[in-house]
Structure formats: C-alpha cells, structure tokens
C-alpha cells in the first residue's frame, strides 16, 4: 500500500459529494423525489436512495448505480406516502458500497428516522470514537451515521430538539434532510457551505440541493434554507427555527460555481450559476489578453466560461472537442495499443476546426494536471492545432477540500508545489493562464461570504485539536 492509501485509511470519509431532495404533502412524493434526484444526478453517480413516509411507516429503497437505472415503476410504487427524501451519492475511491448509500433509516426510542446528507463533517472520527467507547456500533463508514447516533442518544423528548442537539455537536458542512413518520426536517450548517433551497409545488414544499431539480417538476423557488436554520415541514405547515449556534461568517463554497452545480441552477440566494461561470470566463479573457483563432471549451465543465471568454475577447467560439456522454466506468482496451486511448474514449478533437489554428482551450480547473496534459497533446497530434493555449477559469487549486468536494491530498494537487510556468511545461501548452483570486472575488456577489480555501488556504472551519493530525496528513 502506498503512502496515500495509508493516509486515507486513517481518514474519515471526506470524499462525499452529494445531492439531496425532499418533498412533504404531495400524493406523488416518491415519483417526484425520483425526478428530483434525476435532475441532481451530476452531484453523485455511485448510488441513490429514496425513503418515503405514509404517516405511519417509513419505506426505504436504495441501490448502487444511476437513478434512472435503479428506480423502476414497480420499485417506486412500494415507496408509498405523501412525504419522501432522496439522496445521490458521488463515486468515491475506497468506500464504494451499498452500506454507504443514503438515506440511512433507523429505529430509535421516538420511532423511525431517515437522513440524507450533503457535505462533510470534520469532527466525525472523534465523535465516532467517543460513541464506540460507550458501545455504539456503526454500519457504514459515512460521517452521517454519527448524526443518527447523536439523535438517538439525546435526552430531549421531541425529535426537533434531538436534531438540534446532534447538529450542535457536529462541525463541518451539512445540507441535510430528515424524515420521520410525521415530518420533513431540513437543516443547513451555520456557514451555509453547501447549497439548499426551498420550493413549492401544488401546495407541497420541496427542498433540493439545486434549483434545477425544481425546474423538472415545475416547482417554484421560494428561498434558500438559511445557514444555521432548521426548517420543519408537517401538516401544520412550514416552521423555521434558528436553533443552531449562529456564525456571523458565511462560507458558501465557490467551487459550486466553478464546477459542481449545474449551470442552469440558481444557488446561494438565487445567484445564476451560468452567469457567474460566464463572468469567470470574461475575467479570464481580460487577464490573459491573448490573440488566437479559436476558443474551445473542455466539455462540459468549461463551456460557460469559454463562451464568456469568447464574448469578451471577440475570438470565435466553437466545439473543438466532442465528448462521448455514454461512457461507463471501465473500458476494455484492445490488445494492440491505441494512441491517446485514455482521453479519446471521453473526448475527440474536431480536426477540420483545429487544423493549423492557434487555439485557446478553456477548462474550469486543473487538479493533478493529467487531463490538461492529455488534451494539449491530443489537440496538437490528432487535431493538428498550431498553438494550444490553456486558460483555466479558477485560480490554481493549492489545497484539498474538507467540506464535501472530492479533491486529492495537497501533494497530489499540481499547483500546490509547482509554479504556473512549471505546470505549463508539464502540460506542454504554449501558454497557461489562470483566474486570479482577486478576479474571482470581483465576479462573486458579496465575496466575503464565500469559502475560497482550496485556492487561498483560509479554511473557514478548523479541525478540532483531536483530529488536527488528519488535516495535517492531507496538507503535507
Ligand atoms: P486533473 O486531470 O486531475 O487535472 O483534473 C482536471 C479535470 O477534473 C477538469 O477537467 C475538471 O473539470 C475536473 N474536476 C475538477 N474538480 C473535480 C471534482 N471535484 N470531481 C471531479 N472532477 C473534477
Ligand atoms: Fe469549496 Fe474549496 Fe471551500 Fe471546499 S475548500 S468548500 S471546494 S471552496
């Protein structure tokens, strides 16, 4: 086992990127949750689950795979009731199994409760150890299970206070949904790191990670679940409690705008992702100030920024790389080696567009640098491009995320240990430009409310002392 694997085995399950959806008060609760999860599929493709309630019992179904492959009509029919929550889980290294797929459903002294969580808790290992010492048994290696144990052990006699109790003890990012026999409860951590919004459909309340889930089912956006808010939806309507310890500082994840959320969504107080992403591209064009014949995006993540870049620079835009959207997880490579097979399986250059052109390639980010390196080589060798200029619509990624975005350790992030010129040489581009942190902030509304830690190293929530060794392992 290599050094990283050893490190990772010591670490909590920090690689969670997820999507959540919930609905209360609709006769088609499970079907609509299925559609909501389908719209949020980009937030997690490893597995999905739905838990419904008919007022007396909770029904759970979950599986590995994609939403549309898992849920047949027959399976959805069994999820009866007018309330439901659902979850999409991201494909992650090392911890891929059904036991980690949410929602989790448990029985405790007050009845049944299910949970679906987006985000990552940074003190989960510590709490887990504490709980294990007094006899708790865990079935998954997900930090979310800790919350259920804390709820079950709380001394309060109503579920809302128990949830508040549990959430006051956890640290980190959570946009989280709970479902019991009679209510749907939504909560967001005091920093508001992950998005969570409320909508209305035929008098029923819906909650989703992103508004693209509302569009598919014709729900109307009402507002965000506020950072530090617990929202209870039951037959008496919607009630808001500000029960969590309030943080004056917000820390919305800027990476939701850069890469993770869908461009047709509105997140963090109804800010349009597409516009922000395009404006990152405009800023990048101003900063790089480069002449070329063509601007092309790395599809799909670079498309809005490339359009913004082209609009600002006046350089023609086109799709010089075509993406195959139907690739599975593994490919059987033929015995005789095929040049560029690894990247060609996903992307292929449009030769007549690229031949002898000076090309600007726009992508959202560079992590390890391997994708950019392969793309540059392919555009030159297969596409016949004369010059390849790589433009990245975010600042250099120098640190890992502890709050629910899948990033490798600091050592594996190329920009943590290499200067821009060294990265340019590595990816063999004619030039390499990044957005600056200042330019990124210029595009954001109220930039002081954002977490930029993977770019500037200012982590808004620190690991507790007992778990700081884990942070240092990832920051070495
Ligand atoms: P790399 O080859 O490691 O430099 O990866 C860069 C590519 O990964 C870019 O095309 C990004 O769009 C994409 N990317 C960035 N962040 C993530 C993430 N958290 N999960 C999956 N893909 C990502
Ligand atoms: Fe988002 Fe980066 Fe902050 Fe993680 S560290 S929450 S990816 S901005």
Image (spheres, rainbow, N blue to C red):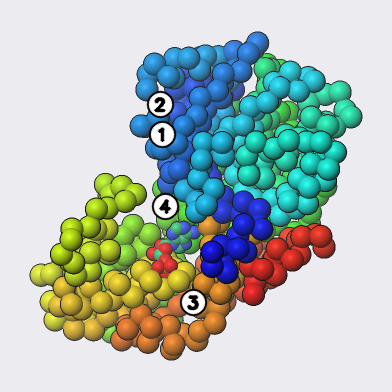
Given residues 277 and 170, the one toward you in this image is 170
- For label 3, the crowd category at 10 Å Cα-Cα, with few meaning under 14, some 14 to 19 and many 20 or more, is many
What residue does disc 3 label?
414
Q: Is residue 318 above or below residue 428?
A: above
Residue placed at 18% from the left, 61% from the top? 335
What residue does disc 1 label?
67
In the rendered structure, the answer to whether residue 155 lies left or right of residue 248 reads right
CA gap, disc 4 and disc 3: 26 Å
The circle drawn on residue 263 is 4
| Mark 1 vs 3, N-terminal side | 1
CA gap, disc 4 and disc 2: 26 Å
- Report helix, strand or loop for mark 3: helix
* Residue 177 seen in the figure: no
| Quarter occupied by residue 473 | bottom right
Given residues 51 and 137, the one toward you in this image is 137
Label 3, ligand 1: CB separation under 8 Å: yes
- For label 1, the crowd category at 10 Å Cα-Cα, with few meaning under 14, some 14 to 19 and many 20 or more, is many
What residue does disc 2 label?
71
| Mark 1 vs 4, N-terminal side | 1
| Mark 2 vs 3, N-terminal side | 2
Residue placed at 57% from the left, 69% from the top? 3
| Quarter occupied by residue 351 | bottom left
CA gap, disc 1 and disc 4: 20 Å
Q: Position of residue 287 (x, y in %)?
A: 43, 81
Q: Position of residue 34 (x, y in %)?
A: 44, 28
Residue placed at 65% from the left, 10% from the top? 56
Task: Point out the image quarter for the C terminus.
Answer: bottom right
CA gap, disc 2 and disc 3: 40 Å
**In this rendering, the label closer to the viewer, 1 or 4:** 1
């Amino acid at each position: 086992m290599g050094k990283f694997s050893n490190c990772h085995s010591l670490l909590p399950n920090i690689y969670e990127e997820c999507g959540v959806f919930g609905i209360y008060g609709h006769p088609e609760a499970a079907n609509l949750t299925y559609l909501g999860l389908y719209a949020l599929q980009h937030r997690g493709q490893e597995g999905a689950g739905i838990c419904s309630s008919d007022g007396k019992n909770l029904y759970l179904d979950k599986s590995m795979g994609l939403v549309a492959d898992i849920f047949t009509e027959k399976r959805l029919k069994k999820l009866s009731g007018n309330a439901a929550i659902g979850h999409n889980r991201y494909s992650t290294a090392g911890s891929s199994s059904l036991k980690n797929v949410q929602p989790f459903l448990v029985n405790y002294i007050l009845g049944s409760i299910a949970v679906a969580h987006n985000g990552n808790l940074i003190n989960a290992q510590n709490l887990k150890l504490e709980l294990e010492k007094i006899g708790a048994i865990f079935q998954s290696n997900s930090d979310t299970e800790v919350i259920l144990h804390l709820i079950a052990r709380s001394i309060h006699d109503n579920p809302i206070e128990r949830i508040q109790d549990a959430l006051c003890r956890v640290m980190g990012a959570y946009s989280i949904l709970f479902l019991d026999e009679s209510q749907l409860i939504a909560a967001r951590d005091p920093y508001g790191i992950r998005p969570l919004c409320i909508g209305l459909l035929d008098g029923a309340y819906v909650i989703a990670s992103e508004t693209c889930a509302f569009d598919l089912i014709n729900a109307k956006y009402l507002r965000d679940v506020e950072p530090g808010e617990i929202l209870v939806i039951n037959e008496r309507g919607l009630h808001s409690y500000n029960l969590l310890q309030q943080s004056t500082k917000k820390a919305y994840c800027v990476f939701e705008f850069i890469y993770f959320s869908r461009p047709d969504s509105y997140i963090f107080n109804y800010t349009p992702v597409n516009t922000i992403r395009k404006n990152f591209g405009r800023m990048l064009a101003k900063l790089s100030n480069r002449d070329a014949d063509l601007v092309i995006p790395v599809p799909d993540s670079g498309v809005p920024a490339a359009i913004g870049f082209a609009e600002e620079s006046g350089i023609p835009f086109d799709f010089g790389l075509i993406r195959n959207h139907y690739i599975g997880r593994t490919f059987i490579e033929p015995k005789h080696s095929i040049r560029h097979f690894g990247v060609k399986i996903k992307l292929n250059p449009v030769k007549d567009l690229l031949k002898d052109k000076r090309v600007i390639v726009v992508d959202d980010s560079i992590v390890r640098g391997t994708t950019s390196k392969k793309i540059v080589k392919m555009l030159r060798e297969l596409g016949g491009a004369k010059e390849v200029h790589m433009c990245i619509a975010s600042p250099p990624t120098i640190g890992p995320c502890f709050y629910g975005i899948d990033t490798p350790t600091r050592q594996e992030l190329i920009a943590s240990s290499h200067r821009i010129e060294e990265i340019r040489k590595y990816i063999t581009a004619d030039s390499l430009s990044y957005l600056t942190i200042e330019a990124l902030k210029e595009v954001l509304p109220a930039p002081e409310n954002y977490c930029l830690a993977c770019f500037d190293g200012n982590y808004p929530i620190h690991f507790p002392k007992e778990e700081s060794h884990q942070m240092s392992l990832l920051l070495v």
